[in-house]
Image: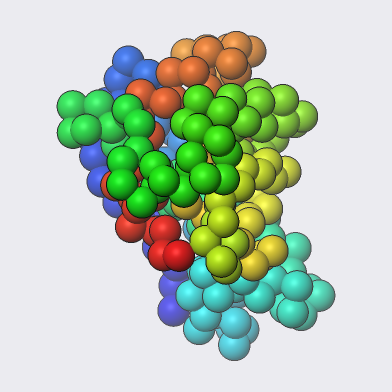
């Protein structure tokens, strides 16, 4: 089974002005595509090539030594970007705003309110040193938390369920925002896909 670059669920320019089309084109068409190619190359001829990307990342620490690092980096890159694209929705289609229903209730219960959640998430995204991601995750009991991960690590490896994610590698924002990661993170909230969070959240 070959892993494939997923099609974006919107056009490259659909997240303008918050994320520019050129950044999206390079990020999806070059960075993400590169991870998929390198993952396929690392798994070629191996029995692990039959596993889904979710299985590989969930079972990362049980993989044979010689493929664990490429799966961690390239497989993580593939899965994390797949989650990142669907964590966003064009503002014209209802991206942004605040969650409703069950997610709203869980956010209020576990963070003490939406603004406190947002503050925690912003801090994780802005203060992460180097390259990585900030995540909203749920544990097996449905309790929400925010966590940063370094490089291409994914919360799934720790048994957590990723609900949404912001990519804070420089390639995600540098063309438009240069070193102003805080401005990118602030703008990103206009794209938050709460419908996808609700779909992934199964307490
Ligand atoms: Mn990226």
Q: Image point 62% across, 71% down: which residue?
A: 58
Q: Is residue 177 above or below residue 15?
A: above
Which quadrant of the figure has residue 127? Answer: top right
Residue 52 is left or right of residue 179, and the answer is left
Name above or below for residue 17 compared with residue 120.
Answer: above
Looking at the image, can residue 91 be seen? yes
Rendering coords of residue 118 (x, y %): 53, 28
Q: Nearer the viewer, residue 100 or 167?
A: 100
Q: Position of residue 189 (x, y in %)?
A: 42, 26
Residue 10 picture location, percent across and down: 24, 39
Residue 110, quarter of picture: top right
Q: Quadrant of the C terminus?
A: bottom left
**Which residue corresponds to the image point at 56% horizontal and 28% vertical from the top-left?**
116
Q: Residue 185 placed where, x, y %? A: 52, 22
Name the image quarter holding the N terminus: bottom left
Q: Say which quarter of the image contains residue 138.
A: bottom right
């Amino acid at each position: 089974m070959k892993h494939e670059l997923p099609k974006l669920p919107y056009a490259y320019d659909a997240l303008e002005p918050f994320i520019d089309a050129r950044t999206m084109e390079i990020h999806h068409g070059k960075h993400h595509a590169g991870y998929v190619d390198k993952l396929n190359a690392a798994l070629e001829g191996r029995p692990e090539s039959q596993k889904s990307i979710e299985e590989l990342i969930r079972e990362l620490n049980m993989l044979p030594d010689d493929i664990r690092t490429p799966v961690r980096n390239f497989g993580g890159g593939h899965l994390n970007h797949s989650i990142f694209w669907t964590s966003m929705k064009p503002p014209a289609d209802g991206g942004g705003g605040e969650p409703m229903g069950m997610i709203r209730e869980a956010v209020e219960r576990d963070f003490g309110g939406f603004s406190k959640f947002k503050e925690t998430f912003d801090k994780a995204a802005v203060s992460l040193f180097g390259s990585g991601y900030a995540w909203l995750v749920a544990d097996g009991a449905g309790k929400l938390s925010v966590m940063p991960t370094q490089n291409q690590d994914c919360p799934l490896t720790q048994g957590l369920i990723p609900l949404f994610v912001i990519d804070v590698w420089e390639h995600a924002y540098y063309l438009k925002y240069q070193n102003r990661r805080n401005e990118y993170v602030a703008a990103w909230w206009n794209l938050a896909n709460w419908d996808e969070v609700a779909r992934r959240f199964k307490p």
